Image (cartoon, rainbow, N blue to C red):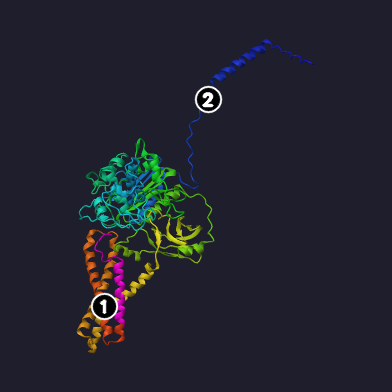
Amino acid sequence: MNAVAPASRRTLRPWQRMLVAVAAAFAVAATAQIQIIPLPEQKPATVRQLGAHELAAGDVQDWADGAMAQAMSRNPVAAAVIVVVKDNNVLFSRGYGYADQASKKPVDPATTLFRVGSTSTLFTWTAVMQLVEQGKLDLDADINRYLDFTIPPHDGKPVTLRELMTHSAGFEDAVKDLYLPHAAPPMSNEAWLKRWVPARIFPAGEVVAYSNYGAALAGYIVQRAAGQPFDDYVEQHIFRRLGMQHATFRQPLPAALQADMAPGYAPASAAPHAFERIAAAPAGALSISGDDMGRFMIAQLQGGGVGDTQLMTAPTMQLMHAFRRASVPGLRPGGLGFMHLDRNGQDIIGQRGATRFFRSELALLPQQHTGLFVALDGAADGALLRELLDGFTDRYFPAPPQIVPPTLATAREHGALLVGRYLPSRRSASNFRGLRDLFVQTSVSMAPDGTLQTPGLDPLQRPARWREVKPFLWLDDASGDHLGAAMQDGRVQWLSTDALAASQLWLPVPRWQSTAWNLRVLGATFGVFLLAALSWPLAALVRRLRGRPLALGDAALRWYRLSRVTAVLQLLFAAGWWLMLPRLDGGTSQLDLRLRLLQLVGLLAVAGTIAIAVNAWFAWRQPTGWWRRLNSVVLLLAGFVTLWYVGSQHLLSLRLDY
């Protein structure tokens, strides 16, 4: 076996050893001076959609200033406020116009108060969820457990708080004395609720129909469960916790806040109106400044609180914001009290509100930790709020590129099932205000290309052409909105759109109840009465000129004249209701006397049907011409038609509740 010889060593000379020692010394010194300096902390990158503007205060001001300048030039807006929050801060807050036109007092977003209408309900629902979290309320219990009066069941089903919060309790609409005249005596929310319980026209939990009565009822339940007035509860448990000093449900306003209230202008150039008093306070009586609404939005976006102040725990807040079962497949109705205002693929929850003189909108984008609040003083069109929200989301959260879905081959077949007339679920049914149903119907028709057309279906009155992109789900390419239909056994149960699904459905109208059919019948009926009323003096004048008196006995002549008086009464009754119906939408008890006088005319007209019948009996009993006999029969048929309408539409109801 061979071994490896060791390598020979090379001996360094003295001067070489000295150089190595010096080099080593310098190396050690240099190494000792090297320091590791950490890199600065890197913040997470902000992800922005392609084409989106940066959500920064300066850019938001540019957008808001431009949008409001254009809006106020095209709409009757006297004053406005816009607030944008991001994360835990108010990013932008600014007033526009004058809080007082006479003194030219500018809007101060920190102090100027606006009425916000139905946006008030977000505070009512927040109060409900606080008490649910404390175990004082149960979302799924019969609400009669918490009341000192009774809400009758419908089809054996009681009402729950969950159904009040999702507007699916089944109540018909209630509007009388919602707004109280300036000179009228005060009416509390409790008194308004107990005076009349609107009929439940749908089973609980099935049909969505926005209900001010339901929201007001929830506020009264808060009052009883908390053991203190609703106003006091909200101030103590919401306003004070969030440092909101310019917000109140109280009516009239507290003395300290009266100077901050923006008077209502409608139109913007008119004299200011008196402070609106709303009987159903939890449904719409909030007066609030822009900055205080910003604090509320931050609490909603931050999981229930701001800093160390909590309105509720994060899980409870998430439950409040979570979606519920959709009434229409493919449409997203909203959460517990929150409506869906989605756009560009963004989940947007919030609420829009309106009084007679103010408009408001609160929109939260939870995934973006962003909120937008807009309040307008003036009778602006509802489309303006939608335009402002659309402009905001398009600028800062534009839609990502999408593949346009194709139109389904079933478009014509399925579309044909939707063609027809529809009634809104939010309506009156047990009282004379239901007469409106003959005139507020909308229609669905099919264009030659197979798309659906729905004039009047959109609350903003925008034209839309819907094409089917999923079974029984249609898309309007211009707006991105969807139209959906709930089907059962091949028939339409109801339909709705993205904009309406959380507050209203549209239900098919039976043919006998359609506007077209009823208008023809009513037109023919009152045409007969008009001819009878006009021919009476004209025929008398012709007979006098010809010297030919009416060849009738005393009794027959008396009943003939009474039948013509009845025709005049029928015309007056119809004209009276034609003028009265628009007033009922904002009706108050001050209309009661006029309604009673109108009903008196109607009662005389109904009683006059007897005179028409007796006149027809004489016409056929005595030897008269065929024209008079035909005339008497047609007039009698018209009388029977009006009897049916008077009865079916409750026009002579003893109760004046609606």
- Which amino acid, by three-letter code, is at mark 2? Ile
Majority secondary structure of magenta residues = helix
Q: In the rendered view, does 254 fall on the left or right side of 400?
A: left
Q: Magenta residues, as a range? A: 630-658
Q: The C terminus lies in which quarter of the figure? A: bottom left
> How far across and how far down the image is residue 650, in percent?
28, 65
Q: Name the residue under label 1.
A: 612
Q: Do the residues labelled 1 and 2 touch (CB within 8 Å)?
A: no
Q: Residue at 38% of width from left, 45% of height from top?
A: 320
Report crowding for label 1: few under 14, some 14 to 19, many 20 or more residues within 10 A (C-alpha).
many
- What is the number of the mark on residue 36? 2
- What is the number of the mark on residue 113? none
Residue 109 visible in the displayed image: yes
Direction top: furthest residue = 14
Mark closer to the chain start, 1 or 2: 2
Q: Does the magenta stretch include residue 652?
A: yes
Q: Is residue 578 magenta?
A: no
Q: The N terminus lies in which quarter of the figure? A: top right
> How far across and how far down the image is residue 409, in percent?
54, 61
Nearer the observer, 13 or 643: 643
> How far across and how far down the image is residue 11, in percent?
70, 11
> How far across and how far down the image is residue 350, in percent?
38, 48
Task: Using the rendered view, name the quadrant where residue 645 is placed.
Answer: bottom left
